[in-house]
Image: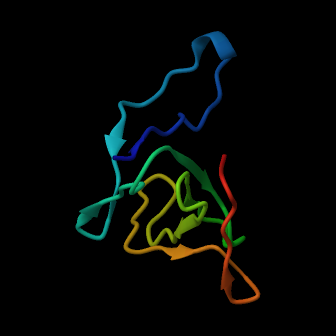
Amino acid sequence: MLVFSFFALATPPAHEILFEVPFRLKAGDTYIDADFGHAAPLYADYDGDGIRELLVGQFESGKLRIYPNYGTDRAPLFKDFTYFQAEGIEVKLPCG
């Protein structure tokens, strides 16, 4: 299960930072799941289009899922994912 929380856009002093209430994200009609072990989510503009995507590293398989954002930064919409590739080959980083 992947639970995510967004920062407020305005950044107050560190002692006043408040998080939104955590919520589960969906891709299409299915909740995003890290399959096994730990997940390492990152919400960032991966492809340079000005809209942040969701990147989720997977512990056991060593792969990186990339969920394109079909919505906006404030109202993201995820439908599917692809695995990170280099020269057409899925990248896997060993763990342990």
Quarter assignment of residue 46: bottom right
Left or right of 53? Residue 29 is left
Q: Position of residue 86 (x, y in %)?
A: 75, 80
Residue 92 placement (x, y as % from top left)? 66, 68
Total marks shown come to 0
Identify which residue, 31 or 38, lies in the foreground: 38
Q: Quadrant of residue 12?
A: top right
Which color mode does the image show? rainbow
Residue at 69% over, 61% down: 93
Residue furthest to the right? 87
Q: Residue furthest bottom?
A: 88
Nearer-the-camera pick, 59 or 85: 59
Most extreme residue toward the front is: 96
> Residue 47 in the image: x percent, y percent?
68, 72
Q: Residue furthest top?
A: 15
Left or right relative to 77: residue 66: right
- The residue at 45%/72% (across/down) is 70
Name the residue: 29% across, 70% down.
28
Across and down, in percent, residue 18 comes to 50, 21
Relative side of 44 to 60, left or right: right
Q: Residue at x 68, y 73 (%)?
A: 91
Tell me: residue 80, above or below residue 64.
below
